[in-house]
Amino acid sequence: MAHELLQYRNLKLFWNDVALSDQLQKLNTPAYVYSRDLLTQRFQAFQDAFPKGRLHFAMKSNHNEALLKHLHQLGSHLDVVSIGEAEKAIQCGFRPDQILFSGPGKTQSEINKALEWGLFQINVESADEIQKIKKTGMRARIGLRWTPGLDVKTHPFIKTSHTDTKFGLSFEEIDQLIPEILKDPHLHLQGFSLHLGSQILDLSDFDLAFSSYLEMVLSLQKKYPEMDLKTLDIGGGLGLNYQNSDVDADTQRLQDYKKIVERHFGKIPFQILFEPGRFLVARSGGILTEVQVVKKTKNKKIVVLDAGMNNLMRPVLYQAHHQVLPLIQRKGESEIVDLVGPLCESSDFIALDRSMSALQVGDKLWVADCGAYGSSMASDYNLRPRALEIFIEDLESLRA
Ligand SMILES: Cc1ncc(COP(=O)(O)O)c(C=O)c1O
C-alpha cells in the first residue's frame, strides 16, 4: 500500500501530516526546509536493516551543518570527497576515525592532511594516489576502490563503475599494486571499496556487482594471504522514485537491497561499510519557492520562480524530475506550464511541461525531495543570494 509523504487535504499540501501552508507561508524564499523527524526515520531504517554495518553517510549529498550534527548524534559515520568536507565534518563533531575519504583526484595536500588527522580509511582510486601516500612517509589505512566495468542503469552522469571511468582501479591494476603496498610497512591495506553510481533503481545491478566483487576479494585473499583485511565497502547508490513520495515503496526497496547484501556478504568476516547519501536525505527536505512572474508566450505558459538552477542543479544537469506542488491548490482546470528559475540563463529550469493548477504571482510552491544533491550543489551564479536553509526539529512546533 502506498503511503505518500506529500498529500493534499482540503486543497492544502501536507508533508508528513503537517500542513505546509500553515507553517511556512511567511518564510522568506527560496528556502530549503529539512525535517529532523524524517531524517531520523530514514537513518534508523537503514541502520536497523544493517545492524552490524558501518554507515558512512555520503556528505557530498548534503553538508548542511544542523543535518550533519543530527546525523552525528544518531551515530552516523561519514564518507567525504574532499578535505573541505572532512574539515567541516570535524567541526560538526565527527571524529577523524569516523571519516572515510573517497574521490578520484585527491591532491598531495589533501592526502597529507587526511593522514595527519588520522582519517579512518583512504579509498584509493589510482596508482598515482598510492605514490602520493608513500611520499608522506606516514602510516596510512587504505582501501582500494575497484571498478567492476559494469554499465549500471542510471543517468550517464551519475554512473561510476563502467570501464572507461575516472573512478577506481581495474582488477589488473589492483593485482599489480597489492605487492607494492604489502612491501611498505607504512601502508595497511585494510579493505576494498566499490561504488556503482547513484540513483540505482534496478537492484539487479547491485546483485551482479556484489557477486563479482566478493569473488574478486576472496581470490585476492587467497593469492595474498598476508593481507590483513578488515573492511569491505559496498558504497551507496540506492535510489528512490521522484515521481511520487511513497515511503512504503522506499521501505520495500531497502528490504530488497538488504536481501541482496545479506546473500552476498552475510557470512564474511569483514566489517561491511555503506556509503548511502540520497536514500537517507532526499526525502527529508524540499525547497519553498514563490512565483515571481507568470507570462504567456505564443505557444507556452511560463512561470518564473525565485528558485532556479543556482539552488537546484539536478533538473538541468540530469534532467531529474522533482514534484512541484502549490502549498494551496486552486480549484479549476490545470494547465501545462514551464516552471523556470530567475537566472539570466536559458537552461535555468526546475520543471518543463508540467501540469499545474492555475498559478499567480506570490503563490508558494514546494519542490519535493531536494534533501540530496540540492543545497550541496548550489552555486553563486548571477550572484543571487544562497537559499535560506532551515532544519526543523519538529514540524508541528512551527504551528502558529
Ligand atoms: C564514492 C561515493 N560514495 C557514495 C556516494 C553516494 O551515493 P548515493 O547518494 O547515490 O547513495 C557517492 C555519490 O555518487 C559517491 O561518489
Image (cartoon, rainbow, N blue to C red):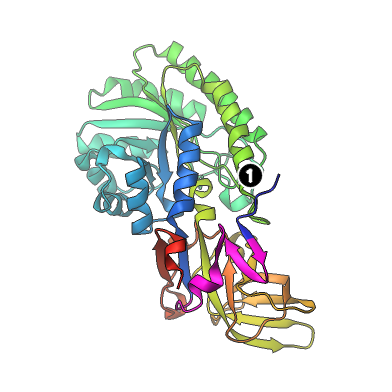
Q: In front: 1, or 309?
A: 1
Does residue 132 appear left or right of residue 376 in this picture? Answer: left
Which residues are the magenta region? 7-29
Name the image quarter holding the C terminus: bottom left
Does residue 201 appear left or right of residue 102 in this picture? Answer: right
Looking at the rendering, which quadrant does residue 326 occupy? bottom right
Instruction: Name the kind of residue labelled 1 in the image.
Output: Asp
Circle 1: element type: helix
387, above or below 122, in the image: below
345, above or below 194, in the image: below
Magenta stretch contains residue 16 = yes
- Which residue, given by chain and number where applicable, does mark 1 sit on? 248
16, above or below 103, in the image: below
Q: Give the image location of residue 338, x and y in percent.
A: 69, 76
Name the image quarter holding the N terminus: top right
Q: Give the image location of residue 304, x and y in percent.
A: 61, 82
2, above or below 212, in the image: below
| Residue sitting at x 34%, y 13% | 226
Magenta stretch contains residue 335 = no
Q: Give the image location of residue 395, x and y in percent.
A: 46, 62
User: Badge 1 local density, few (<14 within 10 Å), some, or many (20+)?
Assistant: some
> Does any portion of residue 3 appear in the rendered image?
yes
